[in-house]
Image (cartoon, helix red, strand yellow):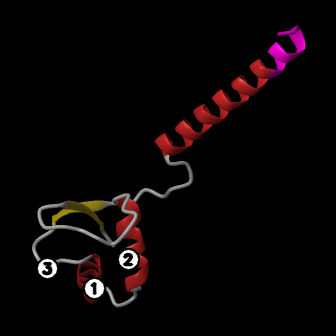
Amino acid sequence: MNNKKLKRRLKVVLFIFVLIICYSIYTSFQIGRKQVNTYELKVVSNDTIWSIAKEICKKDSSLNIQNVIIEIKDINNLNCSEIYAGQTLNIPIY
């Protein structure tokens, strides 16, 4: 391999390495995310994210149930709305 090709490959590898480091830093520190106070809730049989959010919204009528659901999923890194009995969720305090 000639010297030009080696330098080019080294630059590509270095660029990919820098991207990986930047992504790791971003996800580790959660840049841009607001800090939310939470409490832990142990999921019981028949609980759903919707039912949990509905209870929260009963206490504060200014809250939107869809926004509460989104926040619960975001805080708990949930990709879907499925939860199970015995699971512990962090629930935002409003």
Mark 1 belongs to which amino acid? Lys
Rendered location of residue 56, percent (x, y): 27, 80
Earlier-in-chain disc, 1 versus 3: 3
Mark 3 belongs to which amino acid? Asn
Q: Which residue is mark 2?
A: 68
Earlier-in-chain disc, 1 versus 2: 1
Q: Magenta: predominant secondary structure element?
A: helix
Rate crowding at label 2 as few (under 14), some (14 to 19) or many (20 or more) other CA atoms within 10 Å: many
* Label 1 residue SS: helix
Which circle marks residue 88 in the picture? none
Q: Nearer the viewer, mark 2 or mark 3?
A: 3
Q: CA distance from mark 1 to mark 3?
A: 14 Å
Q: From this view, report whether residue 24 is shown above or below residue 53.
A: above
The residue lying toward the viewer, choosing from 7 and 56, is: 7
Rendered location of residue 46, percent (x, y): 14, 79
Which circle marks residue 46 in the picture? 3
Q: CA distance from mark 1 to mark 2?
A: 9 Å
Rate crowding at label 1 as few (under 14), some (14 to 19) or many (20 or more) other CA atoms within 10 Å: some
Rendered location of residue 49, percent (x, y): 28, 76
Q: CA distance from mark 2 to mark 3?
A: 19 Å
Q: State which region is magenta.
A: 1-8
